[in-house]
């Protein structure tokens, strides 16, 4: 059997393997894959045409990889088709390199910047939430997953990485060279605006850092602010897209004494796992305003949904990214894999409403304030209008 014939057989069989693997992952019945057979016949026709009628001989590996990427990209921004080398990284539990650019990314046509860590190399270079990354070290990102891009952006402390940035409708991209550095371990910082009697807390990450993690840090900041005369708090989670859902839920418990903190479900949305507060009484009781934007994603969205849904906080800013879901590895033949969403988190519904998944819908603000448009290379406005509005709302509370 020649190479083209082998590729033809593999191309036809692999979608069936994927359907079977996904069915096993999500607990589908044996009959479920039958529903997709009509689409597989179309796939067969396309493979046959490409193999026999395209203007030149095709590279089987390239075409097949493209087909698999397209299949998975139609699911959501976090799911990805992984080559054997990346599957091995998961199997070996290989951590990300210490050198960090400060960029948190998702996939939207290219790679798109969700958030930029305060004081990071990316922040100093003027990269902002919403920017597109067209290339990383001259490797185009058009066919690159966020999983791959995240690892390419990391490296040894002191090493350099070049990124090609597109902002808005700019005709020309901007090449930026970033020197990777070790990320700060400080997750939560704060100050009291004494004239307003409003405490402003900045959460950098929902990754567990320090004794007690983010929850303990938020509790400590709130206590210090109240002693300093703060009557309300603004919690700024703009551009926060990393960390763990468990940490975000623990942090929400600091403010929500009793009630549903979060709910999540797999394929069967009717079978939800409900997570309730275990603290009994909230440690922090002063009024809270949450400040979020497009870059607020994942665990930060669950935190915002918990406080907003329990009427414990007013949410100011933009709709969040809509990425609150969890992924895991599904193995495929030849050591390939799918990094696939298997469980998603839900907003806490108001009375009479149905719970809506945060994935692709996001967390909606109570008061809409949009990030200002800033041309690449221009300084940000002297006044942070989003923060000013959040403080105004906190004072009113």
Image (cartoon, rainbow, N blue to C red):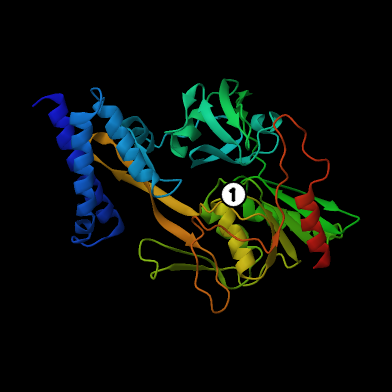
In this view of the protein, can residue 111 be seen by the observer? Answer: yes
Please tell me which residue lies in front, 284 or 117. Answer: 117
Residue drawn at 25 percent across, 46 percent down: 18
Q: How many labels sit on residues? A: 1
Image quarter in which the N terminus is found: top left
Most foreground residue, 157 or 211? 157
Relative to the observer, which residue lies in front, 51 or 27? 51
Is 266 drawn above or below residue 21 in the view shown?
below
Residue 29 occupies quadrant = bottom left
Pointer 1 residue: 206
Q: In the rendered view of the protein, which quadrant contains the C terminus?
A: bottom right
The residue at the far bottom in this view is: 352
Q: Is residue 154 visible?
A: no
Q: Is 60 on the left or on the right of 6, as rendered?
A: right
**Which residue is painted at 13% across and 30% down in the image?**
5
Quarter of the image for residue 304 reads bottom right
Q: Nearer the viewer, residue 123 or 259?
A: 123
- Residue 117: image location, x then y, percent: 65, 38
Q: Residue at x 41, y 49 (%)?
A: 327
Q: Residue furthest left?
A: 1
**Label 1: which secondary element:** loop
Residue 269 image offset from top left, x and y in percent: 40, 66
The reply, left or right, for residue 50 in relation to residue 328 is left
Q: Is residue 397 above or below residue 116?
A: below
Q: Position of residue 249 (x, y in %)?
A: 56, 59
Residue 15, image x, y percentages: 23, 45
Q: Residues within 10 Å of mark 1 (few under 14, many from 20)?
A: many
Name the side, left or right, on which 76 lies relative to 217: left
Q: Is 15 on the left or on the right of 178, as rendered?
A: left
């Amino acid at each position: 059997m020649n190479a083209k014939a082998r590729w033809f057989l593999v191309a036809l069989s692999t979608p069936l393997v994927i359907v079977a693997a996904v069915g096993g992952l999500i607990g589908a019945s044996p009959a479920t894959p039958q529903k997709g057979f009509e689409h597989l016949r179309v796939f067969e026709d396309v493979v046959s045409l490409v193999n026999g009628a395209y203007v030149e001989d095709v590279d089987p590996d390239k075409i097949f990889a493209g087909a698999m990427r397209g299949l998975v990209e139609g699911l959501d921004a976090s799911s990805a088709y992984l080559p054997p080398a990346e599957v091995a990284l998961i199997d070996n539990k290989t951590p990300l390199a210490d050198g960090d650019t400060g960029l948190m990314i998702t996939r939207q046509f290219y790679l798109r910047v969700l958030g930029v860590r305060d004081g990071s190399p990316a922040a100093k270079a003027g990269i902002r939430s919403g920017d597109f990354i067209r290339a990383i070290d001259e490797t185009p990102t058009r066919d690159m997953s966020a999983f791959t891009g995240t690892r390419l952006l990391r490296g040894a402390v002191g090493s350099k990485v070049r990124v090609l940035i597109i902002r808005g409708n700019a005709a020309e991209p901007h090449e930026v060279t970033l020197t990777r550095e070790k990320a700060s371990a400080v997750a939560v910082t704060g100050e009291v605006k004494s004239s307003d009697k409003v405490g402003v807390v900045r959460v950098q990450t929902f990754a567990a850092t320090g004794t007690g993690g983010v929850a303990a840090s938020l509790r400590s900041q709130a206590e210090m602010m109240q002693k300093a005369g703060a009557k309300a708090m603004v919690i700024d989670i703009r551009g926060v897209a990393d960390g763990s859902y468990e940490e975000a839920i623990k942090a929400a418990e600091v403010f929500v004494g009793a009630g549903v903190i979060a709910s999540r479900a797999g394929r069967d949305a009717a079978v939800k796992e409900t997570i309730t507060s275990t603290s009994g009484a909230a440690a922090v009781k002063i009024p809270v305003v949450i400040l979020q934007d497009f870059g607020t994603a994942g665990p930060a969205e669950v935190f915002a949904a918990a406080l907003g849904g329990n009427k414990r906080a007013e949410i100011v800013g933009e709709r969040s990214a809509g990425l609150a879901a969890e992924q895991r590895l599904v193995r495929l033949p030849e050591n390939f894999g799918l990094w696939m969403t298997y469980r998603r988190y839900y907003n806490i519904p108001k009375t009479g409403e149905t719970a809506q998944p945060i994935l692709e819908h996001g967390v909606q603000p109570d008061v809409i304030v949009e990030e200002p448009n800033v041309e690449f290379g221009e300084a940000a406005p002297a006044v942070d209008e989003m923060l000013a509005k959040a403080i105004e709302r906190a004072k009113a509370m």
